[in-house]
Image: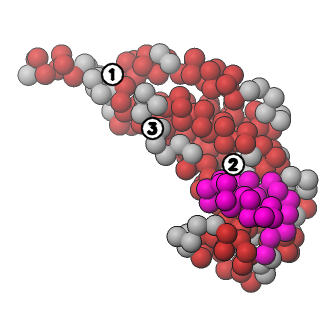
Amino acid sequence: MDRCGQLSKNLTPRAFCLDFGHAGDHLPAAKFKDIIWPSMSESLITKKALAASIKALMEGTALEKIAVKDIVEHCGLNRQTFYYHFRDKYELVNWIYRTEGLESIANYRDYSTWTTGIKRIYEHLHANRAFYINAVNTLEQNTFNDYLFEATQQLVAGVADELSRDIRVSAADRTFIADFYAFAFVGLTTRWVKTGMKESVEDMTERISDIVEGSMQRALSKYAEAPIGRLRRTL
C-alpha cells in the first residue's frame, strides 16, 4: 500500500487532510477524492486538497513566495479550479483559519470547559506550527488576529454570560468585558506564534487560565447594577 493509501486507511478525512499537508508528496486531485470519505462534497474535497497543498508548501517556503501555480501543481488541480473556490492564496489561508481553527473549539464555550477550548486552540496552532508561523509573519497576510478574536470572543462571551447569570450586568458591559479578555488573548497568542511557539501548550494554557480565573468574576461584579436575588426580594 502506498503512502496515500496508508493515510486514508489510518486517519479520519480531516486528520488525513491535515497530515497530508505535511507529507510533501504530490497527489492527483482525483486520487485525493477517491481515498477520503465519499460523504464529503466535491467542493469541500477540492478546498481541503488546496489547503493541504499550501500547508505542505509552507513547510519550506515563505507564503509570499508561493504562487497559485505552485499550489495547484502540487495537488494536481488547475488554476481555473482554484479561482472557482478562492480569489487568491490569502483567501485560501483565511479559509483554513476559519474552518480548522473554529472547528477545534465548537463545543467548549461554557465556564466548565472554556480552559479546554483555549488549550484546543493552542494545540491546533502548535500542530500546524509551520503554517501559522509562516502566515502570521507574512506582511500581506494580516487577518490572523481577526480570526483569533472571533474564535476567542465567542468562547469568552459564553463564559461571561454564564458567570453573570446571578448578577445584573448589561449586555453591553458583558460584551465589553469579553472583548477585553479576547483582545488580551489575541495579543499574547500572536506574539507566541510570531516568536516560534517556544513556550509549551500547557504553559500557555495555564497562564491564561490563571489570569482569567477569578478576575472575570470580579470584573463582572464591578459592573453589576444589583444582584438579581436582592432585586427580586425588593419587588
Instruction: Name the residue tied to disc 1.
Output: 224
Whether residue 91 can be seen here: no
Amino acid found under the numbered disc labelled 1: Ala
Instruction: Name the residue tied to disc 3.
Output: 109
Q: Are marks 3 and 2 in contact (CB under 8 Å)?
A: no
Q: Are marks 1 and 2 in contact (CB under 8 Å)?
A: no
Residue reaching furthest to the left: 235
Residue 165 appears at what percent x and percent y?
A: 30, 28
Q: Quadrant of residue 127?
A: top right
Residue reaching furthest to the front: 1
Residue 60 appears at what percent x and percent y?
A: 91, 53
Q: Residues within 10 Å of mark 1 (few under 14, many from 20)?
A: some
In the image, what residue occupies the spot 83% across and 35% down? 196
Q: Which quadrant is home to the C terminus?
A: top left
Mark 3 or 1: in front is 3
Task: Report the span colored magenta.
Answer: 1-28
230 displayed left or right of 56: left
Instruction: Name the residue tied to disc 2.
Output: 144
Residue 35 appears at what percent x and percent y?
A: 67, 69
Which labelled disc corresponds to residue 62?
A: none
N-terminal-most mark, 3 or 2: 3
Task: Measure the alpha-carbon separation of dots 1 and 2.
Answer: 33 Å
